Image (cartoon, rainbow, N blue to C red):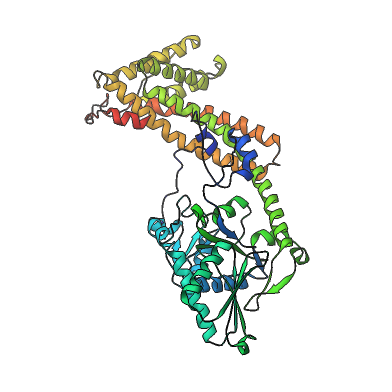
Amino acid sequence: VPVQPEHEVLGQISVRGYISQYAIVSGMTGTAISSKSEFKRTYGLNVTSVAPSNRVKRTDLAPRMYFSKRDKFEAMLDEVAFCQRVGRPVLIGTHSIDECDAISRLLTSSGIDHNLLNAANDLEEERIVHEAGLLGSVTVATDMAGRGTDIVLEAGLDAQITRNYVRLISGLLDDGVGVVTLNCPTNDAAGMLLTAIGADDLSDSVVAFNNGLGTEVVVRANDVSKHERTFNLSFGLGLFVIGAEASDNPRVDRQLMGRSGRQGAFGASQFFLSSEDTLFKDAGLASSSLGDTRPDAAGRIFREGLQLNRNLEKLQKEAGKNAEARRARIEEYTRVFEAQSFAYYSRRKEILCIEDFQAFLDSLVETKAEQLTQKYFPEMLVDDYPRQFAGLSEELDLDYNASASSLRGTDINGLEEEIVELLNERMDRTRENYPGDEFKKLGILLYLQTADEIWKDHIAYIQNLILSTQLCGDHGRGDMAGFTIISFESYGLFQTRIVDSYLPKLAGFPGGPSGGPQPPRVELSQDVLRILV
């Protein structure tokens, strides 16, 4: 891995801070109802539920929890293999790139063609999202990848899937199976299946009845002697979404589920869990509290039912409260920093558009003169004049190339004014090399460059301060108060550092009294000025 410089944050803003810049704010999401109180408290926004324009045909199947991740992944592979057999597209959602890659390797080892969508290959997102709705496609994606885009299903997809089911039924009957039972999640899906079976003109008896959870379609062979051999199938249409792990935030899970069954299309979702998943492992729940066990078609033991659903909902609710509390604490720190950020950028904009640059420069010179006087003669005290004056003289000479010999012996009460005059003379000598508005343009641009460089350091310091406060504090109000005091003291030092760095740069800018060649003049266009704002 090649060595690269550490990344620098040039600027930052929170979502709340960004939204606060707009007078009118609105948005749309399918998962806002559960967070309506936080939307109101944090952003001042009300949440209103809007009924869908099309009837929802998506079926959200009950989650299954296996005892190990290995069993869970094997069960997922079996489900994907069956879906691919009948042509039903599958989207597998994961929490991380690592988990995404692990499932991808399992699919590859099982000979299942698939697409991988994560942050590592987001340049291919458009192609992968397009292919995710095609017949028999399998897509593995992180929860965040591809959000905000519809997975458009291939035209005639459900009809092709239904025909594949009919072929599968016919093959089973030909292989000696006497009864094939298909569990259909909705009456609409059962209707499509019955129509396809009738069109195929199977010479076997077909019975459909409602079992309370959906519609069962039972196909019996005409040969009664075969009826002892039975086979059960789950019938489904549209995109099948598989969740590889439950999130501690139920909104994330619902967003994944919502990738299927959009705009009134058929679809389904199901989460495959394990007791080794982070959410359950950290909770330390007793196995008996998660419901009864039963085997799947391959003999793997899993839990499913009301008890598991209730415990999952409880864990996610508790995790959601903790996450909301963490966000609230972070928001307090962010508000303090954003107050400084808004103040800095507001001041930056004022300086960029300043009319009287000379008055601005004079104020900086006066500030610097006051700092120098207080630094070397604090509170106008003289205890070792030669040493104190030597320090002042050395700083003026090194930073400004200005001789302070004429100031020796000056009354301390008038020293600040004399320093102002000396620094103004130094700035005047630089100004002589830049006629007209050139000196003003140079001064503004140099100030902004200097301030932006130091602002990066201030951001890094505040980030480290937040981290250290959270790690070492007791998460009480005292932590926040201490952070506020220190951060605003740091902001004051940040402003002082700008003056300390800017004035020497301006005084010694190439083309000044050093006699060196003047750099080519750069005219700032209005477009550049707008960008700098």
Residue 289 is situated, as x and y percent measured from the top left of the image, at 77, 63
Looking at the image, which residue is at 62% across and 59% down?
A: 246
| Residue at the (65%, 35%) spot, across then down | 480
**Between residues 71 and 50, which one lies in front from this camera angle?**
50
Residue 396, placed above or below residue 258: above
Q: Quadrant of residue 307?
A: bottom right
Q: Front-most of 309 and 464?
A: 309
Left or right placement of residue 143 versus residue 324 in this view:
left
Q: Position of residue 360 (x, y in %)?
A: 40, 17
Q: How many marks?
A: 0
Q: Is residue 449 left or right of residue 254?
A: left
Q: Which image quarter is the C terminus in?
A: top left
Q: Position of residue 240 (x, y in %)?
A: 53, 63
Quick check: can you spot residue 507? no
Q: Is residue 348 left or right of residue 256?
A: left
490 vs 509, nearest the viewer: 490
Q: Is residue 58 above or below residue 453?
A: below
Q: Which residue is nearer to you in this view: 440 or 58?
A: 58
**Which residue occupies 62% across, 90% down?**
225
Q: Taking 424 as reference, is 522 above or below it?
A: below
Q: Is residue 435 visible?
A: yes
Q: Position of residue 122 (x, y in %)?
A: 41, 56
Q: Residue at x 56, y 42 (%)?
A: 50
- Quarter of the picture containing the N terminus is bottom left
Furthest-bottom residue in this view:
225
Q: Viewed as shown, does residue 278 lie left or right of 8?
A: right
Above-or-below relation of 181 to 366: below
Q: Where on the picture, by quarter, is residue 517?
A: top left
